[in-house]
Image (cartoon, rainbow, N blue to C red):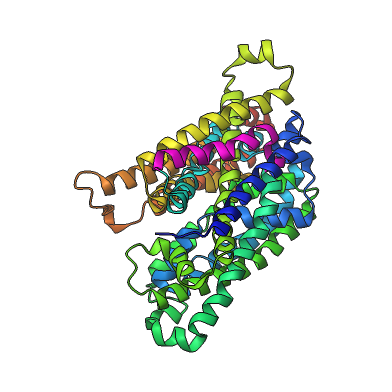
Amino acid sequence: MISLSPADALLIILYFISVIVVGFHSARKTTTRQEDYLLAGRSLTLPVFVMTLVSTWYGGILGVGEFSYLYGISNWFVQGVPYYLFAAFFAFLLARKIRATNLYTIPDKLYQSYDTKTAVLGAVLTFILMTPAPYILMLSLFLQMIFGWGMGFSLAVTAVLALSYLYLGGFRSDVATDVLEFILMFVGFAVIIPYAVSHFGGLEFLQAHLPPFHLMWHGGHSPQFIMVWFFIALWTLVDPAFHQRCYAAKDGATAQRGILVSIFFWFLFDGMTAAAGLYARAALPRLDEPMLSYPMLAEIVLPPVAKGLFYIGILATIMSTLNTLGFVSAQTLGRDILLRLGIGRSIRATTIVDTETAASGFTKAGLIISFFLSVLLALAIPSVIKIWYTIGTVTIPGLLVPLMASYFARLRIPARFAFLAMLFGWLTSLSWLIAGYGGSGSGTYPLGVEPMYPGLAVALVLWGVGRVRSSMINSLPASSSADSSRNRSSLA
């Protein structure tokens, strides 16, 4: 399906070698101290912050190609604008607050604001949310297309490739490879647009060969469909990669400005990917697999070397996100679940010197377990879209309300209600999802409502009850301070 010249194949091989070299070189600077291994010493400057955040947040490039091919520039407005808005919201209201805490992870914040069980449940949901399975699957499928490998071998190569330098270098290796991949992803799409224009023509060609809705901002979608994507974009507010990079920034101003600058680069890259998707649809109107629209466009317009650079751009876009999700899920499993629960306490007592080294050691163990489980998930659900949809639908309703409330004193609720909002927000969406696919497997949800909505509604109701309860306690007269103290203790 994909034909590579020797020059193209050599470029792709050199790309993988470069990623490994950069990752291992960065690992030489990494120590086992928790702050260094997990957050690169909180040293991210503005340019590095922007490059690592931009590249990390854009891993689903083949899915972007599919959406652009099917629905035109609405991809920019439906899957771009909501994320720009919530990213800006994150920058202005959360970025400085997150950096000021000097914490490490989202479960750390939940523990600080609530209690251990809320933190552990939040860690479980974060681990599910950040599974690298979709990106392991995507990269493996692409390697199959390029080299003709079997699925099992491609999955193994993908996992080992990313695991090796992350294991040794931690977050510093993740960031260093992200910087390289930021450059390559823009180079790749900067190559294909001029060739497409030269090969087919400009706007006149697109207008003549595209369905009418492809050049309309809404793409022919209903308001309800567009609104669903705005709710899905709430993912931004609970995205552990956003929080991780804010924790790792050298200060709060860097975190805030970095997100705002990143929005510009996302806007620019969205424009490039949308244009490539339009040319693919206009030139290849009957593709059986719209997800392959970018590679198929490259096959007909790009000469050797240029084609290799474009495929490297796609690989870099996927790989940057795979690295980050793999590391965050490992950190969550190892440090925030196993270490916080005290699992492996006897191992720590005999082989690990202190808490600093313990966090790094358990993250390394989590890295191996996380990648193994992700490969199994990719084999069990060989669909990127289904994995994305299932994960986002069931985890966001549980995490969103308690986490957002934890950063604002006026919104915070007692620990018991935070735990219940998280638990039942998650379980409601999960049950709704199962009900929709149970029995006949038709995918028709109860009352025709998407699973995310009832989960969010339940979480908000429990948050409201918690706020009322908290207000009642705070309004008790001074003479009842002792009773008030006992009440607060029982809630926590």
**x, y (%) of residue 405?**
60, 47
**Is 114 displayed left or right of 71 in the figure?**
right
Tally of numbered tags = 0
Q: Can residue 263 be seen here? A: yes
Corner quadrant of residue 171: top right
Magenta residues, as a range? 150-173
Looking at the picture, tell me which residue is in the foreground, 338 or 61: 61
Looking at the image, the residue that sits furthest to the front is 6
Above or below, 481 relative to 26: above
Furthest residue toward left? 440
Front residue of this view, candidates 341 and 302: 302
Depth check: give the residue in front, 214 or 356: 214
Q: Is residue 149 magenta?
A: no
Magenta stretch: dominant secondary structure: helix
Q: Is residue 146 above or below residue 485?
A: below
Tell me the quarter of the picture where residue 313 sits: bottom right
Of the 4 image quadrants, the one containing the N terminus is: bottom left
Q: Is residue 156 magenta?
A: yes
